[in-house]
Amino acid sequence: MGWTSKFRRLLTRVFPFDRNSQRVIICSIIHNISIHDLGIDCAMPRDTAISPQPVLLGFLMLGPRHPYELHQEFDAELGRVWHIGQSHLYAYLKQLAESGLATVKTEAQPNRPARNVYYITPAGQETFLNWLHQPTQHSRHIRLEFLARLYFFRRLSQPGLEQLV
């Protein structure tokens, strides 16, 4: 089985698009890979790590969540593509709250300790939507960012998917 067949199978499991949409996505990815193979400088600095913060904002766009719930949903929905440890998730949520992209409220629970629930702010919504509509900058990031963007376009029923692909 060739790599395109394997990729199509993975794509079908993660994003149940029709065959034409899959072909467009695969052609887009092949295009980015072929640019690299042709010797066009696609080098990127080593310090440009991909942050899962926009993805966390995307899940908060669906509604308020506590960190464990966010981790479970992240793992269930994007775990085949992107992994984030629970301790890292807590750190990223703290950064989102400190930067004003999310707010945290402590909610009491009967017979249990209180839990923190995160809400997205208007600034966080704007940041997420800007991230969602911009193209993936580096071919190295396609496997994570591009597929996450596709997921949120579908999940949030956002217009503009054609421009992304």
Image (cartoon, helix red, strand yellow):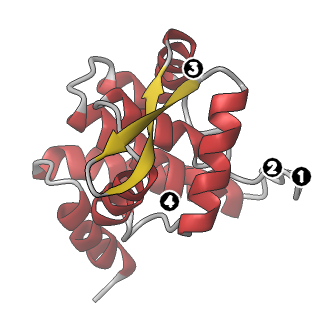
Dot 1 falls on a residue whose secondary structure is loop
Q: Residue at x 36, y 41 (%)?
A: 108
Number of on-image labels:
4
Splitting the image into 4 quarters, where does residue 100 fall? top right
Drawn side of residue 39 relative to residue 111, left or right: right
**Kind of residue at disc 3:** Thr
**Kind of residue at disc 4:** Arg
Which circle's residue, 4 or 1, is located before the other in the chain? Answer: 1
Dot in front, 2 or 1: 2
**Kind of residue at disc 2:** Thr
Dot in front, 4 or 2: 2
Drawn side of residue 64 relative to residue 133, left or right: left
Dot 2 falls on a residue whose secondary structure is loop
- Which dot marks residue 45? 1
Q: Is residue 107 above or below residue 47?
A: above
Where is mark 3, residue-wise? 127
Which circle's residue, 1 or 3, is located before the other in the chain? Answer: 1
Where is mark 4, residue-wise? 143
Drawn side of residue 39 relative to residue 71, left or right: right
**Kind of residue at disc 1:** Pro
Dot 3 falls on a residue whose secondary structure is helix
Q: Nearer the viewer, residue 8 or 63?
A: 63
Marks 4 and 1 close (CB-CB < 8 Å): no
Q: Is residue 147 above or below residue 95?
A: below
Q: Residue at x 46, y 24 (%)?
A: 120
Disc 4 packing (10 Å; few <14; some 14–19; many ≥20): few
Please state the horizontal and vertical placement of residue 83, each as a whole percent of the image.
50, 68
Q: Quadrant of the N terminus?
A: bottom left
3D distance between C-alphas at marks 2 and 1: 6 Å
Q: Is residue 165 visible?
A: no
Disc 2 packing (10 Å; few <14; some 14–19; many ≥20): few
Where is mark 2, residue-wise? 48
